[in-house]
Image (cartoon, rainbow, N blue to C red):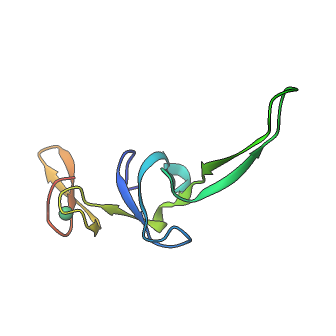
Amino acid sequence: MKVRKNDNVIMRNGKDSGKTGKILFTFPSENRVVVEGLNLVKRHLRARRQGQKGQIVNKERSVNVSSVQLMCPKCSKPTRIGYLLEGDSKVRICKKCNGEI
Ligand SMILES: [Zn+2]
């Protein structure tokens, strides 16, 4: 997967298309990510104890990594990620501005 935790991404389809958010979790084996504030589903929590109220909370559901695109922190445009070899380490670069990500 090319995106990582804490990357800013933009949703490319679904009801949150065009919205941006930060990646909270990645699930590389399933190619899925959880983006903060996006793809929310309502969870109805039942009261567990007496006197406690049931409540509805919004929770992020994971989305397929192909539905999101990285927002470049340098040129703040949605971009694709390229790699550059610098010595022994791989550096991620923005395909649009060639800036290091
Ligand atoms: Zn860029």
- Does residue 95 appear to the left or right of 35 in the view shown? left
Outermost left residue: 87
Residue 55, given in percent of the width and then of the height, sits at 74, 42
Q: Is residue 73 above or below residue 54?
A: below
Q: Is residue 78 visible?
A: yes
Residue at 19%, 70% in the rendered image: 96
Specify the quadrant of the image occupied by residue 94. bottom left
Q: Foreground residue, 22 or 96?
A: 22
Of the four image quadrants, the one with ligand 1 is bottom left
Q: Foreground residue, 90 or 64?
A: 64
Residue 61, given in percent of the width and then of the height, sits at 60, 54
- Does residue 54 appear to the left or right of 60 in the view shown? right
Residue at 22%, 52% in the rendered image: 101
Q: Is residue 7 above or below residue 95?
A: above
Residue at 65%, 56% in the rendered image: 41
Residue 74, given in percent of the width and then of the height, sits at 18, 57
Q: Is residue 2 visible?
A: no
Q: Foreground residue, 59 or 94?
A: 59
- Does residue 21 appear to the left or right of 62 in the view shown? left
Q: Is residue 61 above or below residue 64?
A: above
Give the mark count. 0
Residue 16, given in percent of the width and then of the height, sits at 51, 67
User: Where's the N terminus, which quadrant?
Assistant: bottom left
Specify the quadrant of the image occupied by residue 97. bottom left
- Does residue 20 appear to the left or right of 101 in the view shown? right
Specify the quadrant of the image occupied by residue 21. bottom left
